[in-house]
Image (cartoon, rainbow, N blue to C red):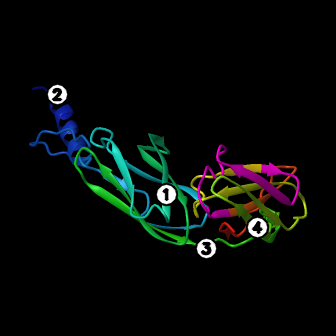
Amino acid sequence: MGMKGFMKKISMIGLMAFIGISTTTPVLAITPSYNVHPYSFSIEKTEACAEEGDDFTLRVSGSAVTLGTTSWTTSDDKVVQICSTESGAFGLSKGYRVKLHAQKEGTAVITAKNSKNSSTLSCKITVEKGMVDDSEVVEPENQLEAPVILSTTNSGTSKAGKISLSWTAVEGASQYQVQVSQKKDFSTTKIDKLTNKTTYTAGWNYYNNVGFGTKNPTYYYRVKAISGEGIESVWSETAVCPAS
């Protein structure tokens, strides 16, 4: 080796030593690695608060390969109700989302279950009473008072007779619905009529659907008021009138 070649080799060795590379150990390439747990499954929160009437969402996310489908349950649907579920990309991750509605004050646990590995995650939801804003108070639609039955009659024999009733007038009412039944719960009615008066009279005989030959029938009466806009009162208290 000539002097020029020797000096070149010495220079290369010195450079390698200067930058910290061993002259006897081969250099290995280092490739970074990332470890994703095959059963990654996470929920965005484990506790949350809401007010009565609130609509809100809850989300789970995980590995696209192992997430599977997610089913949702609520421990008390009278407190927090499940409205709908959906899947997709939410933010930077894929997963499942449930839309919830806070029904009333109380506590409910929302549980998400992964179909691929049966793992479950849960979030405790505390529902509090909402603050009432007087400016948003809506008056109830039912503004009519219920009529009060003043008198009833039920006279006749097993073949023919007459029933009648009267009630108080209700301000704002344009008509009244009258029901007469032989059952306390009005599951069936003998009479169900509309009138613009505050009295109602019906004759019955063996051939019509009121008495139909019943000896000494007992009837139950009730009335409700209805406005011209279709707004209804609640039913009056039931009056009972046996045959006289």
Place residue 216 in its image quadrant.
Answer: bottom right
Report if residue 212 is visible in the image: yes
Q: Which amino acid does the dot numbered 2 rest on?
A: Gly
Identify the element where label 2 is drawn: helix
- Determine crowd level at label 4: few under 14, some 14-19, many 20+ residues with C-alpha closer than 10 A: many
Of the two numbered discs 3 and 2 on the same chain, state the one appearing first in sequence: 2
Quick check: is 216 in the magenta stretch? yes
In the rendered image of this protein, does residue 214 appear above or below residue 95? below
Asked whether disc 4 touches disc 2, contact meaning CB atoms under 8 Å apart, the reply is no
Of the two numbered discs 4 and 2 on the same chain, state the one appearing first in sequence: 2
* Residue indicated by mark 4: 152
Asked whether 30 or 21 is in front, the reply is 30
* Residue indicated by mark 2: 5
On the rendered structure, is 104 left or right of 178? left
Of the two numbered discs 1 and 2 on the same chain, state the one appearing first in sequence: 2
Q: Which amino acid does the dot numbered 1 rest on?
A: Gln
Of the two numbered discs 4 and 1 on the same chain, state the one appearing first in sequence: 1
Asked whether disc 3 touches disc 1, contact meaning CB atoms under 8 Å apart, the reply is no
Identify the element where label 3 is drawn: loop
On the rendered structure, is 157 left or right of 134? left
Q: Which amino acid does the dot numbered 3 rest on?
A: Lys
* Residue indicated by mark 3: 129
- Tell me the distance, in whole angstroms, between the alpha carbons under discs 4 and 2: 131 Å
Q: Which contiguous range is marked in magenta? A: 194-220
- Tell me the distance, in whole angstroms, between the alpha carbons under discs 4 and 1: 47 Å
Quick check: is 170 in the magenta stretch? no
